[in-house]
Amino acid sequence: MRFEGSLTIRAPREKVWGFLTDPEKVSRCAPGLETLEVLAPGQRFRAVASVGFGAVKATFANEVEWLDLEPPSRARMKVHGTAPGSAVDATSEMRLADAPEGHTAMAWSAEVSVVGTIASVAARLMGSVAQRLTDAFFDAVRRRIEAYREFRFGPVPLDAAEGRILGHNVAGLDGRPALRKGRPLSAEDVARLRDLGRTVVYVAELGTDDVGEDAAARRVAEAATGDGLRLSGTSSGRVNLVATALGVLRLDPARLGRVNEVDGVAFATPPAHSVVRAGQVVATVKIIPYALPEGSVRAAERLAREGGPLLRVDALAARQVGLILSGSLPARGRIVRDFEGPLRARVEALGSALRAVDFVPLEEDGGESALADALLAQARAGASLVVLAGETAIVDRHDIAPRAIERAGGVIACFGAPVDPGNLLLLAYLGSIPVLGAPGCVRSPKVNVIDWVLPRLLTGERLSHADVVALGHGGLLEDVPERRAPREALR
């Protein structure tokens, strides 16, 4: 089947071209369109649309590809669509030319082939339905282009200000705020501005294709919101994401960066894997201008939800944590005092409990075996995680603690961390149970390496060597007084 036609659009050719080659804008003119996905900007996209031929209805998944683009004069595209038992193939062409009074003359043609169930059942109706849909599409295109206006910001006379958005705060004669920016100006507001001696006011005027700041912020935030989060109210183009429980914030920093590349979107969060508490604001979405184009909002939404919501909070369930301390017997009291309190406070702040504290003397050859036995005993008693600490930090991959872990049947995931304080961290696993060899800095209440790995392990995450290596970015922390000052010695 061949279809063709022509029409005149009261708009410049460049404007018509820009609209017709923008799938986001054109999609809002297509009858029956359900979804649109841009696969390669300016090249390919996928559209799902429903079509009815009398009592026969079908939903086609269409792959659309531009073949030739000669801006702003000529374009060709091909379409391949499938529905259960049917297929459609089409090629179309449009040509644009300047018309009198700054208008554009458009001529279009399409060759369409339909096979399968639809072709056999609805053959008599196909031509008339296709013509009706085509006419409706181009009429919608013409109306949208002719009605289209762009976002504008600037000064206007007071006589033209009513209904537009106030661009700046306005002070009264007493110096106090009289009118707040961001409000649509009413007739009373305009009269008040006139009483204040104003003749001109800065305003924003949304374009046909624009989404207001509050609606845009809400849409982006909703797309990004995963488990363990709720949205706040929306005001002045801002909406917050709030944690609903104690947990660890999960996000992909690279994808967050891509959302923030959408012009006009500002999406801020704490660092990935931060501990957050119920009621805490863990992200804020701010739309910087008074409105964003619909296409920009859709792009930000897509980036925020692709592969799953951008943000979620993994709840910290109550777990049992074991602590095994080691060292010389005469120093036992001091070692327990130094380590138990700070570690217990950390564990309990994360909603878990320090279930048992064992002490293993390491003064004789049997220390390695005794430490292995203590590890196995903690595992049998139900510990979800075991922390090792003591009089001397682990200083080598083949030190007593890693050898004891391997003797107990465990595996070493990583020794050493690019975090200071905390370089001498050991991470191992006894089956599914994490074992942390804690450096001496854990005696301090100040933030150190243990505060970066302990919460993640308590969510059930299995950290790898690569996860520990990644801690180097931001890993230079404030020093702690519980250790000698190696940084000072190097000044």
Image (cartoon, rainbow, N blue to C red):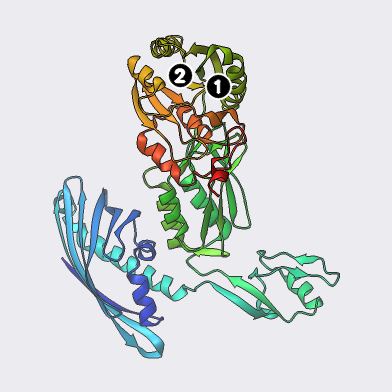
Q: CA distance from mark 1 to mark 2?
A: 10 Å
Q: Is residue 90 visible?
A: yes
Residue 332 rendering spot, x and y as whole percentages: 57, 14
Is 368 located above or below residue 467 in the figure? above
Dot 2 surroundings within 10 Å: few (below 14), some, or many (20 or more)? many
At label 2, the amino acid type is Ser
- For label 2, the SS is loop
State the residue position of label 2: 384
Q: Are marks 1 and 2 in contact (CB under 8 Å)?
A: yes
User: What is the number of the mark on residue 352?
Assistant: 1
Residue 385 rendering spot, x and y as whole percentages: 46, 21
Residue 347 rendering spot, x and y as whole percentages: 56, 24
Relative to 284, 385 lies left or right = left
Q: Is residue 357 visible?
A: no
Q: How many labels were placed on the picture?
A: 2
Give whichever of 73, 354 is nearer the camera. Answer: 354
- The numbered mark, 1 or 2, whose residue comes first in the sequence reads 1
Give whichever of 37, 62 is nearer the camera. Answer: 37
Q: Residue at x 54, y 64 (%)?
A: 291
Q: Residue at x 18, y 51 (%)?
A: 118
At label 1, the amino acid type is Ser
Extreme-right residue of the structure: 174
